């Protein structure tokens, strides 16, 4: 599977990992379940029957990423781009990934927060972290820009929060233009 297929693979995996979906497919269309598992490159079941063992294998495979509080760090992201009223999304990054970033540029940690804030990694009821959302990291507010991140002053953050959601995109463009 090439890099361009990864988002599709992750979306399929998230769908399959919804236990209700898995159970429904298991009962109503086991062939579709097998095809979906093959599509995400999950190892084929050891035997054609029973698929229940596959659910256990799949869950074990997915659970290798430990996002429990003891094995991850949490960051708050104000979902200002697409949600009204604004909610704060908690994004967890596995400790193993943070260890790789230790001592590196701050931008890499912000990129990791952005990555792990995508619904394909941590499904939530609201949109993935997007340009226009604000990441709180290192005692600062970082607006997700079209490319990279922009450190906001407290006044900019306050003004940005108070603007109607529909006008925030224009404000984001203004802030980006003033920093380039």
Image: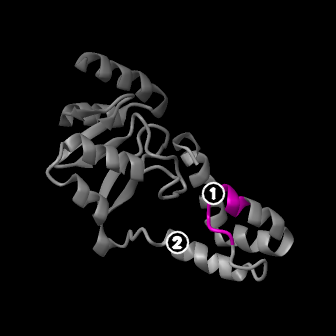
Residue drawn at (65%, 60%), measured in percent from left and top?
Answer: 15
Residue ID for mark 1? 40
Q: Mark 2 falls on what kind of element?
A: helix
Mark linked to residue 20:
none
Color style of the picture: one colour
Tell whether 128 sits left or right of 23. left
Mark linked to residue 61:
2
Tell whether 4 sits left or right of 85. right
Q: Is residue 38 magenta?
A: yes
Which sits in the foreground, 43 or 18? Answer: 43
Q: Residues within 10 Å of mark 1 (few under 14, many from 20)?
A: some
Residue 42 on image: x %, y %: 62, 64
Residue drawn at (55%, 44%), measured in percent from left and top?
Answer: 2
Q: Is residue 101 above or below residue 162?
A: below
Q: Is residue 129 magenta?
A: no
Tell whether 56 sits left or right of 155. right
Q: Is residue 55 above or below residue 152?
A: below
The answer to whether residue 159 shows anywhere in this view is yes
Residues in magenta?
A: 36-44
Give the farthest residue toward the front. Answer: 46
Examine the image and state in which quarter residue 50 appears.
bottom right
Give the farthest residue toward the left. Answer: 103
Q: On the rendered image, what quadrant is the C terminus found in?
A: top left
Q: Is residue 78 above or below residue 81?
A: below
Q: Residues within 10 Å of mark 2 (few under 14, many from 20)?
A: few
The answer to whether residue 73 shows anywhere in this view is no
Give the farthest residue toward the right. Answer: 28
Which sits in the foreground, 42 or 17? Answer: 42
Which sits in the foreground, 94 or 54? Answer: 54
Examine the image and state in which quarter residue 12 appears.
bottom right
């Amino acid at each position: 599977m090439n890099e361009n297929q990864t988002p599709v693979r992750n979306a399929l995996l998230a769908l399959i990992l919804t236990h209700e979906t898995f159970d429904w497919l298991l009962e109503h269309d086991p062939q579709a379940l097998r095809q979906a598992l093959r599509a995400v490159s999950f190892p084929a079941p050891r035997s054609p029957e029973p698929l229940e063992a596959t659910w256990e294998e799949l869950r074990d495979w997915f659970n290798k990423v430990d996002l429990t509080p003891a094995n991850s760090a949490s960051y708050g992201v104000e979902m200002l781009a697409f949600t009204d009223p604004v909610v704060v999304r908690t994004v967890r990054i596995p400790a193993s990934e943070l260890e790789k970033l230790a001592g590196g540029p701050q931008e890499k940690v912000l990129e990791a927060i952005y990555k792990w804030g995508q619904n394909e990694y941590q499904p939530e009821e609201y949109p993935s972290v997007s340009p226009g959302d604000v990441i709180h990291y290192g005692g600062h507010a970082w607006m997700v820009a079209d490319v990279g991140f922009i450190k906001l002053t407290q006044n900019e953050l306050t003004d940005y929060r108070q603007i109607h959601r529909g006008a925030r995109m224009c404000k984001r463009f203004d802030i980006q233009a003033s920093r380039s």
